[in-house]
Amino acid sequence: MPAPKILVIEDELPIRKFLRVSLESNGYRMLESGRAEQGLQMAASDSPDVVILDLGLPDLDGLTVIERLREWSSVPIIVLSARGREADKVLALDSGADDYLTKPFSIGELLARLRVTLRHQAGNFAAAEPVTQIGDLIVDQGARRVFLGATEVHLTPIEYKLLTTLVRHSGKVVTHRQLLKEVWGPDSLEENQYLRVYFGQLRRKIETDPARPRYLITEAGVGYRIADQ
C-alpha cells in the first residue's frame, strides 16, 4: 500500500518544516502550501488522504477553505489552529471539519488523530471528482467554473450552489426541502418559489431549450435531479 498522502495548508514555515520531519519519519507523504487558494488547487489535483488545515491563512479564512472543500470533496479535514475557544471549534466542525487540535499541539496526539481518521476512512473513502461532465456541460468544482463546451457560463453564487448541489447528489432526486436547506438554510424550507425563480434563470443559461431541459430535470412535486452522464 502506498504511504498515506497528507496535505498541510499552513502559512507558518517553521510549523510546516516540523510537520514534514514528523510525518515523513512516521511513514506519511506530505504535500504543503502556505496559502489557501493554492491548497485548494492541490486538494483538487493531488487527491490527498487527509488535509491538515490552519484557520489563520493570509488569503482566505480557514472556515472558507473548509466550506469550499466540502462543495465537492469528503476528504477528512483536521484543523490545527491557535483559535482555542469552544465557539471556534464548534464553528469549524459545523462547517465540515472532522477534527480540531489547538496550537501548541503534541505531535504524538496529532499522529494518533491521523491514525484514527485513516482507520475510519479505510475501505469506504472515495474522494469526489472535482470535474464533472454531462454532455457539453462541464462543472469544475475545484476551480469553481462552469462551461458549455468551450464557452464559460457565468453563474451567480446561488445558481452555482444549486447546480453543484445537484452534481454532488448525482443519480438521486434532490427534494425541494433538501435544496432549500443546503442553499438557503433551514429557515427557508417552505420558500419553493425561490427554486422556481432560480432554476428558471439557471436553465436559461445552460439549456439550449429551457422549456425542454437536457441537464436540469424536474421531478414533479418532489424536486430536481441532474441528468445522467
Image: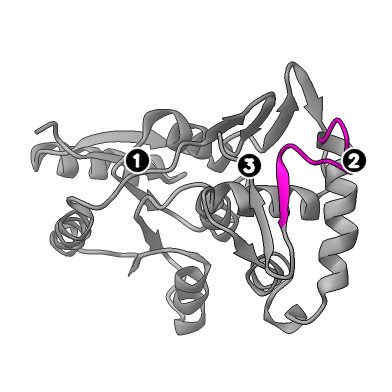
Q: Is residue 111 left or right of residue 99?
A: left
The circle on residue 99 is none
Q: Earlier in the sequence, mark 3 or mark 1?
A: 1
Label 3: which residue?
227
Q: CA distance from mark 3 to mark 1?
A: 33 Å
The image quadrant where one finds the C terminus is top right
| Mark 1 nearby-residue class (10 Å; few <14, some 14–19, many ≥20) | many
Q: Is residue 150 left or right of residue 34?
A: right
Residue at 70 percent across and 53 percent down: it is 161
Q: Amino acid at mark 2?
A: Arg
User: CB under 8 Å between callouts 2 and 1?
Assistant: no
Q: CA distance from mark 2 to mark 1?
A: 39 Å
| Label 1 residue SS | strand
Residue at 66 percent across and 38 percent down: it is 144
Label 1: which residue?
7
Q: Amino acid at mark 3?
A: Ala
Q: Quadrant of residue 7?
A: top left
* Vertical position of residue 78 compared to residue 12: above or below: below
Residue 115 x/y as whole percent = 14, 56
Q: Is residue 81 left or right of residue 144?
A: left
* Vertical position of residue 7 compared to residue 198: above or below: above
The circle on residue 204 is 2
Q: Which residues are magenta?
A: 207-218
| Label 2 residue SS | helix
Q: Earlier in the sequence, mark 2 or mark 3?
A: 2
Residue 175 x/y as whole percent = 64, 68
Query: Is residue 13 something that shows in the picture?
Result: yes
Query: Is residue 15 rendered magenta in the image?
Result: no
* Vertical position of residue 43 compared to residue 184: above or below: above
